[in-house]
Amino acid sequence: MISYTTLGSNDLEKATQFYDALFGEMGVGQMWSNDTFVGYGVAMDKPMFAICKPHNGEKATVGNGTMISLALPGPAEVDKVYAKAIELGAQDEGAAGPRGDSGFYCGYFRDPDGNKLNAFCMVPPAQS
């Protein structure tokens, strides 16, 4: 159902460096870019993630309650991507690990512009 998500950036160069390295940990690269927009994904017919300078020329702001979740195959990959985000200067919003006994395993962080993301996977509760 989702084609792509877009987060605004006030420093597209810095955001591009952050997401190039972060998504590189996931084996995902840029699908298209220009001087105001960079899109990431694995194929044009799969959901994608994009960063951009706001079209109206106004300052990009963080949405209150807005979060993008990055699906990963397992806890090791969640740990790796979360650690990479923090290494790249992301702000910690909740270390990678299990959340309760539901099998939900994730790590929360904010990108250089303050946008909230999480890396997550579902695991059998005994593995979390």
Image: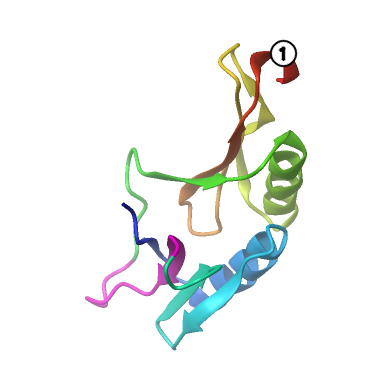
Q: Quadrant of residue 125?
A: top right
Magenta extent: 46-59
Q: Is residue 14 left or right of residue 34?
A: right
Name the residue: 63% across, 51% down: 90
Name the image quarter holding residue 89. bottom right
How packed is label 1: few (under 14 Cα within 10 Å), some, or many (20 or more)?
A: few
Pick the front one: 4 or 14: 4
Q: Residue furthest bottom?
A: 35
In the image, residue 82 sits, relative to residue 41, either above or below, namely above
All told, the count of numbered labels is 1
Q: Position of residue 36 (x, y in %)?
A: 40, 82
Q: Nearer the viewer, residue 120 or 89?
A: 120
* In this picture, residue 20 sits left or right of residue 1: right
Q: Is 9 located above or below residue 105 in the figure?
A: below
Residue 97 shown in magenta: no
Q: SS for tag 1? A: helix
Say if 94 sits above or below 57 in the image: above
Where is residue 58? Give x, y as percent.
Answer: 26, 71
In the image: residue 28, left or right of residue 50: right
| Nearer to us in this view, 59 or 100 | 100
List the residue tagged with mark 1.
126
Q: Quadrant of residue 103?
A: top right
Farthest residue, direction left: 56
The secondary structure that dominates the magenta segment is loop
The residue type indicated by label 1 comes to: Ala
Image quarter hosting the C terminus: top right
User: Is residue 38 shown above or below 74?
Assistant: below
Which residue of the protein is positioned furthest toward the front in this rendering?
A: 45
Residue shown at 37% from the left, 75% from the top: 53
In this image, 42 relative to 64: left or right? right
What is the x, y in percent for residue 18? 63, 65
